[in-house]
Image (tube, rainbow, N blue to C red):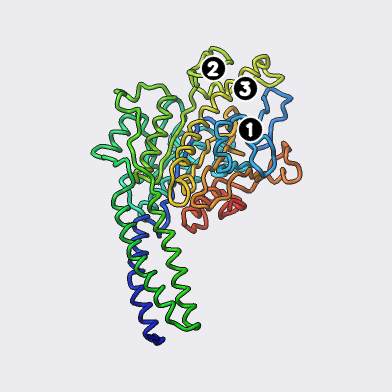
Amino acid sequence: MQASRRLFLKGVGGLAIGLPLLELNHGRAWGREGTPAKRLIVTFEHGGTISPSTRTGVKEDGTGEHHAWDDWGPSDPGEALAFGPIHTPLESVRSDCLLLRGIDNMACTKKAPYGGDHGWANVTALTAADVQVIDKDQSALGPSIDHVVAQRLAERNPVAFKALHLMVRGHQYGTPLYSGPKSEVSSETDPVAVFQKLFAGFTPSGAPDPALTKLRNNQKSVLDGVMSGLGILRKRVGRADLAIVDAHTDHLRELEKRIELLAAQPVCTLPSGFSDKKVGQSLRADVVGNLHVDLILAAMRCGLTNVATLEIADIITNWLPTPYGPVAFDIGHSLHHLAREVGPKGPEAANAAKWREEMQINRRWRMSLLARLAEGLKATPEGAGTMLDNSLILHTSEFSDGSSHSSADIPMLLIGKAGNYFRTGRHLNYNDKAVSSPTTRAYSTTASTHNVFTSVLHAFGYDDAHFGNDAATVKGPLPRLV
């Protein structure tokens, strides 16, 4: 029997009546408009890296007392990312990385006395904020980027913990984390205590969420019915109305793909290695670091949080080879200060190679924690890809060269695409002088952490025009990231 146009349109409307609920429920299952939730992990290494940057960003030339090595930099100055000696632990996730050079912490370099010190550099490193000084102590007058993202994500997708703050404890000069003006955030150093807090009364299934599985099956049933009805109507309509049916069919196929993504939810399991540890504070730093990483991964796989921070204190990695030899100090910053003594004219020139090797070992261990994080996220299927595809790891420090207390050309590394927002596998140098001479020691930049953090907000779906105070040379997101 030939159906009339009116009956046809009425039939399509009747069959499609379940679609709004279908799409709404699907969005609720994901927690954000039908897409996997995005996640931010900020890792912060105290004390800087192996860098030749002076406080103005100009590079040491290697003829004086400073070593002038740039071991944070890539082995090739081009855009295709080729890791240097510090980043070798990250080789398995190189295609997921963005190494940024020529980024200044202008909230420090432009407003701090003498271009910055420990206090100014720390409190502005993640806040890009103005600073209040009381009795020589500095305090940021704004929140750090992790807190802003955590607050907004919690409104969009409520979780048990807005953020998880962990630290590999040791010597450092204050925290870069702030929840608001003059409000420092304390990080937990005991992984056993964190484990007990996170998973108290929590019994993960070891399998995909049954509620999501049931939802997927119910939605698939509704979708199958609608598709079947459209298939019948398609045989009964004329050419003019056939386009309408086909448009509905294409839309339904897209919904079908989205429903199928529910089958690839991360599996929530408890992390191992905590049951036999009585006092987490007594554990060696390398053990604590790995346990902290495993806690972050488990918390995110189980949907307990979408934001985490990991501070790595400026410690000496004495469980690893120490070719420089026994030292008369027990803090990493003192070791770093030898950067200005191992140059060809320095008092420690004879030990330069041993110092460089020990510093590389130390900094590679820090990168190994990032690698453990990134590889764990990448090994976890989610949706059509992995959790790393939907996440962003932001790694930085308060200094580039800790011996000169330089906040110019700071270490800045992004890992993950934040939902295919960033184009990764690249090295981007924002030093204007490097455009015509990639290996130049000269330095000039308009890129600031303000711009990087604005880009982070954009990646998470927020269109802020600016993040931080007025010290940035230009406002807005960092160009060329997307």
Q: Classify residue 20 by image quadrant.
A: bottom left
Quadrant location of the N terminus? bottom left
Tell me if residue 194 comes above or below residue 433 in the rendering: above
In front: 476, or 142? Answer: 476
Type of the residue with mark 3:
Arg
In front: 221, or 168? Answer: 221
Q: Can residue 144 be seen?
A: no
Task: Give the total of numbered labels.
Answer: 3
Of labels 1 and 3, earlier in sequence is 1
In front: 392, or 215? Answer: 215
Identify the residue position indicated by label 3 in the image.
356
SS at mark 2 in the image: loop
Type of the residue with mark 1:
Gly
SS at mark 3 in the image: helix
Marks 1 and 3, how far apart at CA: 14 Å
Q: Is residue 7 left or right of residue 450?
A: left
Type of the residue with mark 2:
Pro
Q: Can residue 388 be seen?
A: yes
Identify the residue position indicated by label 2 in the image.
321
Marks 3 and 2, how far apart at CA: 12 Å
Q: Position of residue 186 (x, y in %)?
A: 37, 36
Of labels 2 and 1, earlier in sequence is 1
Identify the residue position indicated by label 1 in the image.
84
Which tag is nearer the camera, tag 1 or tag 3?
1
Q: Residue at x 58, y 39 (%)?
A: 94
Circle 2/circle 1 CB separation < 8 Å? no
Tell me if residue 215 comes above or below residue 339 in the rendering: below
